[in-house]
Amino acid sequence: MKEEKIPYDKQIFVCTHDLKGEKPSCGDHQGAAIFKELRRVAKEKGLHPRIRVAQATCLGQCDSGTSIMVYPDDIWFKNVQLKDVDELIKKFFPE
């Protein structure tokens, strides 16, 4: 095992867990679409992988709508909707 510094300036984890309607989950609230759009824009702006947008299969807050966790900022968003992506881009993707 070799210990190293984190290779990213920022990591944005978007929950995409989908329980197919058996119980509430981020999949019920467009988690996958939110992830895909954030990742697309990060790549388009040349920020990926310095700013890494990654899928989280479960962040443990299924009743809160789609959840996003941002490190090292220690920020948690809940009930994120596709319409919020532009605001997230402005907040986390520098020009």
Image (cartoon, helix red, strand yellow):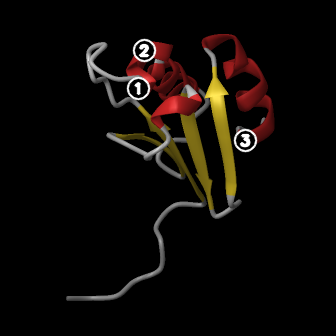
Residue drawn at (47%, 72%) of the image: 6
Quarter of the image for the C terminus: give it. top right
Q: Residue at x 47, y 26 (%)?
A: 35
| Amino acid, disc 3 | Phe
Q: Residue 61 or 68: which is nearer the viewer?
A: 61
In the rendered view, tell whether residue 86 sits above or below residue 9: above
- Cα distance between the residues tagged 1 and 2: 6 Å
N-terminal of the two: label 2 or label 3?
2
> Circle 3 sits on which residue?
92
For disc 1, the marked residue is: 25
Instruction: Identify the image quadrant of the N terminus.
Output: bottom left
Q: Are marks 1 and 2 in contact (CB under 8 Å)?
A: yes
- Left or right: residue 37 versus residue 27 is right
Marks 3 and 1, how far apart in space?
Answer: 25 Å
Which three-letter amino acid code belongs to the residue tagged 2? Asp
Residue matched to label 2: 28
Camera-side residue: 73 or 39? 73
